Amino acid sequence: MQLLLVEDDLPLASSLRQALQKTGYAVNHVGTGNSALHAVKVERPDIVVLDIGLPDIDGIAVLKKLRATDKTLPVLLLTARDSVDDKVVGLDSGADDYLAKPFEMTELFARLRVLERRLSTVKTSEITIGQVCLDTVDQRVTFHGQELELARKEYMLLKSLMENAGRVMTRPTLENRLYSWGEEVSSNAVEVHIHHLRKKFGNDFIKTIRGVGYKLDAAQV
């Protein structure tokens, strides 16, 4: 899952980015509203986490510009403004959710999981396909009831495939969900992670759609 974090407070942005990456997100960061608008235009993220108090353009104005061209991009507002009127303005401008500073990271993660489920083919935090069960809250994966240890990228890839069971995921889409800007990505990175997952779950668990990408069949038993 690729997030665009729009936050001008660099220490806060750094801590948020580290925490989100540890939780299994690919996080890209910009510090201004104009940079955010450009970033979304160049490469649409899965979710935008948008601070209202930006140095160049107010976050509400950024949100309105985003909504003028994209009605469905999930946007979570972050703000130090905690009045009811401010929340109403944010939600009426097209925000999907609103989180007032200061906040606990666990609450941010929970809000993001809700937005993720809106994008996903599944609507619960526990996804089961065949004998594989993935818990997005505890970040646990079990196979035939036994918990498995997965590398972070393997977990992120498995999560993306399981959340989109029945859909074909292209390699560029999967790369965007696994890697942030500036991360070194080898030409066969996705294939290597797929190979490792197949060694754990069997060759038939992840289907290759030749020339297109990969998919999981939701009806596996």
Image (cartoon, helix red, strand yellow):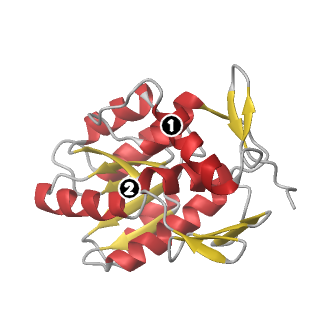
x, y percentage for residue 155?
Answer: 51, 57
Depth check, mark 2 against mark 1: the one in front is: 1
Mark 1: few/some/many CA within 10 Å (<14, 14-19, 20+): few
Q: Residue at x 64, y 53 (%)?
A: 119
Determine the image quadrant of residue 35.
top left
Location of residue 9 with respect to 147 vertically, above or below = above
- Outermost residue to the top: 211
> What's the CA distance linking mark 2 and mark 1?
30 Å
The C terminus lies in quadrant:
bottom right
Camera-side residue: 212 or 9? 212
Assign a secondary structure to mark 2.
strand
State whether residue 69 appears in this view.
no
Looking at the rendered structure, which numbered label has been put on residue 55? none
Q: Is residue 29 left or right of residue 167?
A: left
Sequence-earlier tag: 2 or 1: 2
Mark 2: few/some/many CA within 10 Å (<14, 14-19, 20+): many
Location of residue 191 with respect to 20 vertically, above or below = above
The type of residue carrying mark 2 is Val
Q: Residue at x 24, y 78 (%)?
A: 102
x, y percentage for residue 21?
Answer: 34, 57
Mark 2 lies on residue: 49
- Outermost residue to the left: 11
The type of residue carrying mark 1 is Val
x, y percentage for residue 76?
Answer: 44, 60
Mark 1 lies on residue: 192
Q: Is residue 110 left or right of residue 61?
A: right
